[in-house]
Image: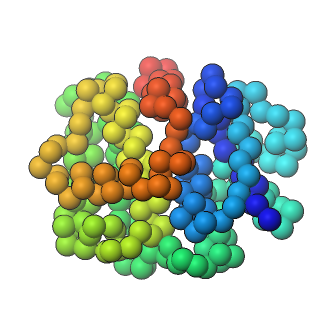
């Protein structure tokens, strides 16, 4: 039986996969574990009635496990790991928080209008820390094998690349070679290609209201 997954539809293209990094984290996990799933694309500005009935908060992603719709990507990937243990995507506890501050730093820098506020430096500090970690332990966060930590980070790093490139004409410094090798590995995985937003323009459209409120 295919799992039912509700994920964000692309802005202005309700039949295409949208740009939610948390939804992609869930579909990436299912693809890596080869778990069959059926995708419901939700237009977040015009949510279908059935969706708000099963999920009053109206957030995505939600996945149906045993007749119950479960929200929150952290909870969802935990349940998937439990129900479908093979192949294991568990990240060793000592590596579980690697890269966890990148999303916050990226969003702060993206929204920043003041070049001297330190937000660029704060992001660079986080990216350098990831690069150092990969240099010591790579190519993935926990070594040779992809784990849940990579699948959580991959969509966020894709958003970082697209949004900062578009809104700030900013790219990750070339000397962070392990970081660049890592993102190349992640973005070229079959699971990533299958679950990525339909087009970069949907990522840009998704960030536009946050950058220019």
Residue nearest the observer in this picture, 71 or 105: 71
Residue nearest the observer in this picture, 120 or 199: 199
Does residue 197 appear to the left or right of 184 in the view shown?
A: right
What's the coloring here? Answer: rainbow
- The total number of labels drawn is 0
Pick out the residue farthest to the front: 190
Residue 206, x across and y down, in percent = 52, 30
Residue nearest the observer in this picture, 74 or 178: 178
The N terminus, quarter of image: bottom right
Does residue 141 appear to the left or right of 135 in the view shown?
A: right
Residue 124 visible? The answer is yes
Residue 207 visible? The answer is no
Pick out the residue farthest to the left: 175
Residue 141, x across and y down, in percent = 34, 68
For the point 64% across and 56% down, which residue is it?
72
Indicate the quadrant where residue 28 lies: bottom right
For the point 27% across and 39% down, which residue is it?
119
Residue nearest the observer in this picture, 37 or 137: 37
Residue 209, x across and y down, in percent = 51, 24
Does residue 186 appear to the left or right of 71 in the view shown?
A: left
For the point 68% across and 29% down, which residue is it?
14
For the point 49% across and 20% down, which residue is it?
213
């Amino acid at each position: 039986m295919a799992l039912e997954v509700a994920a964000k539809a692309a802005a202005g293209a309700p039949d295409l996969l949208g740009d939610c990094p948390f939804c992609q984290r869930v579909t990436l996990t299912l693809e890596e574990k080869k778990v069959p799933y059926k995708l419901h694309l939700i237009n977040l500005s015009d949510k279908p009635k059935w969706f708000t009935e099963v999920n009053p908060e109206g957030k995505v992603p939600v996945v149906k496990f045993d007749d119950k719709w479960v929200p929150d990507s952290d909870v969802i990937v935990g349940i998937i790991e439990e129900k479908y243990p093979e192949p294991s995507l568990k990240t060793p506890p000592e590596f579980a928080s690697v890269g966890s501050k990148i999303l916050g730093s990226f969003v702060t820098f993206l929204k920043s209008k003041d070049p001297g506020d330190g937000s660029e430096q704060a992001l660079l500090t986080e990216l350098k820390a990831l690069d150092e970690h990969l240099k010591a332990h790579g190519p993935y966060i926990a070594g040779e094998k992809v784990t849940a930590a990579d699948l959580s980070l991959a969509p966020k790093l894709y958003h970082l690349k697209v949004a900062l490139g578009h809104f700030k004409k900013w790219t990750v410094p070339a000397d962070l070679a392990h970081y660049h090798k890592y993102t190349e590995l992640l973005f070229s995985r079959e699971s990533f290609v299958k679950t990525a937003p339909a087009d970069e323009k949907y990522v840009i459209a998704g960030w536009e209201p946050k950058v220019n409120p």
